Amino acid sequence: MSAYWITVLTQTCIFAIMGLGLNVVWGWSGDFDLAFYGYVALGAYLTIVLTVGKPLPPIQYILGYTLPYPLAVAIAVAVVTGVAAVIGAVALRNLRAIYFAITTLGAISVLYVVVQVYTPLFNGFNGVAGLVTPMAGTLGLSYDSYGYFFLGLCATSLLVLAVMLSRLSASPFGRLLRAIRDDEDAAAAFGRRVYRSKLKAYLLSAAIAGFAGGLFAGFLGSFNPTAWSPQEVLTLYAGVLVGGRGNVRGVILGIFVVYIAFIELTRFLPEIPGNGAFAPAVRQVLIGLLIIGMLKFRPQGIVPEPLGLDGPRPGIRWRFWQDPRTASAAGGEP
Amino acid sequence: MTVILRAEALNKSFGGVRAVNGCSFTLREGSVTGLIGPNGAGKSTAIDLLSGFQRPDSGSAFLDGVPLIGKAPHDISRLGLIRTFQSPREWASLSVLDNLLLAMREYGRESIWRGVLRPVREAPQRVRAREILDRFGLGSLINAPAGTLSGGQKRLLEFARIAAAGPRLLILDEPMGGVNPVLGERIHQAIGDFVAHGSTVVVVEHNLRFIEETCDEVIVMSLGAVIAQGPYAALRNDPQVVDAYLGEVQDHV
């Protein structure tokens, strides 16, 4: 495998983990969270400042510890979850739909500006750097094999997370979140704690975002405001929508479609001299067209959200191309 | 006579409108009570106040002596008071089966950790759900997404969910809205069934024939207050009640 493909696959695995986190809050819980990428960024920044040691002037950032990479990621996840608890507790109490989205957009915009302007936090616009091939020394990995190792780490993380979230999706908790998404008053009338359940989903989603941020930091080695922006989350939303909102496997598929297919296809576009932004712009346009096309012709995504069915093998099942909704409504299941 | 619910001087204003104005009544355990009154009498608001969806400006209410006012809707539901809404509020993207499993009053299943660590089979709950769905004639639709059901089927699903929850006090908000006579008979039977299983029922309804056939007594509300309570036969000639409500619809009865 070429170094190029290792890079692309590693990055897409990390984006897929982000997509899974976004799916918890948007796919299951139904909350259009625009602060999501802020949790990714916070996870990445914290992972770096917890591992690379004291800053050398004029560089400045907080903490500056030399913790082992896995421990740093774990702490980053914990801190990100704590920040999400504050934002979620405010935003989820009474705000729904567009009001929730605006509040979370406000939160990430504030975070973005603070990180850029307040230099003592994460070195402002220049960002933090120096997390080179984490754990390579401990594991005795050469520079050549490290790419494979980190891809394996990201792919394994994605797989473990996908299994856990698939179980959760089929569990009564997943069912509860979907019910709250469909009609939260009815859920409350049947004794379900709407606010607490939504907050749990929000924290789980933020924790996954923080974890993805930790992996992203290990992958990039450095992190600064040009590496992320509040709009970044919209491409993730596109992936979740295309693959199948609410379906774990669909989300992974959608992220791979959006991030790999589109980036790869647009590589072969002709270059227009003096207009270097042509290919990236076409990519954005194509993603936009894909979203519109999906919403028009297959709003449930490539792999629709699974349905809790009765039968010999109880629990949630899925079919790749067939929508289980229409299949079972027609009496397809025994 | 055991009192299951006591509402005392409930008040609720929206702007300058006193939607509920000193509303007081008691309910007997095991009774079916009709709550009637003209549009705007405050019936739906009174339900919202009792079930915690709105907070009254003043007044109190007790279910089995436990105060309800100030509690959240889910806490009141967990005390055994289940209410419905004017239109069926199914969880549209869930299967009919999941709609029933989620209506059951067993909340411990919905933990994140249990969900991740080992599959929750819910075998006894599934057996119960199947049995209830068969009883309501929805057995063949067990795997259908609830949002694809017809209007009448959604009504039946609402009653199946109530059966799954087994409420102590059930408040039905206009269960006969858009319902044909055959289905109406089924709803009448279902209410009798709930009472046989130990529920007390309140029905808000404009269909007075249904009220007459189903309810042991009626509460008449007008302008946010209870103006009369007693057996329907006795109240239909009460001049105050006729004046407030029955006069305008008696021709249709």
Image: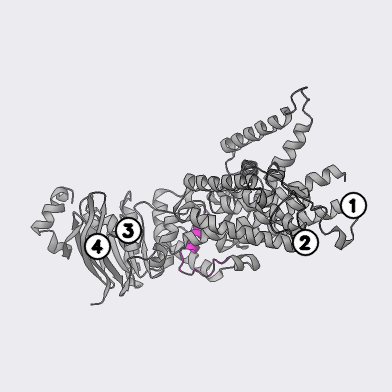
State how far apart marks 1 and 4 are (Cα): 74 Å
Q: Earlier in the sequence, mark 4 or mark 3?
A: 4
In the picture of the structure, the residue carrying the numbered disc 1 is A143
Image depth: mark 3 or mark 2 in front: 2
As drawn, the label of residue B48 is: 3
State how far apart marks 4 and 3 are (Cα): 11 Å
Q: Amino acid at mark 4?
A: Leu
Image depth: mark 1 or mark 4 in front: 1
Can residue B223 be seen at all in this image of the molecule? yes
Q: Chain of mark 4?
A: B
The answer to whether residue B64 is above or below residue A108 is below
As drawn, the label of residue A66 is: 2
State how far apart marks 1 and 2 are (Cα): 21 Å
Is A324 magenta? The answer is no
Q: Amino acid at mark 2?
A: Thr
Q: Do discs 4 and 3 share a chain?
A: yes
Q: Chain of mark 2?
A: A
Give the extent of the magenta segment: B93-111
Pick the front one: A151 or B38: A151
Q: Chain of mark 3?
A: B
Which residue reaches farthest left?
B239
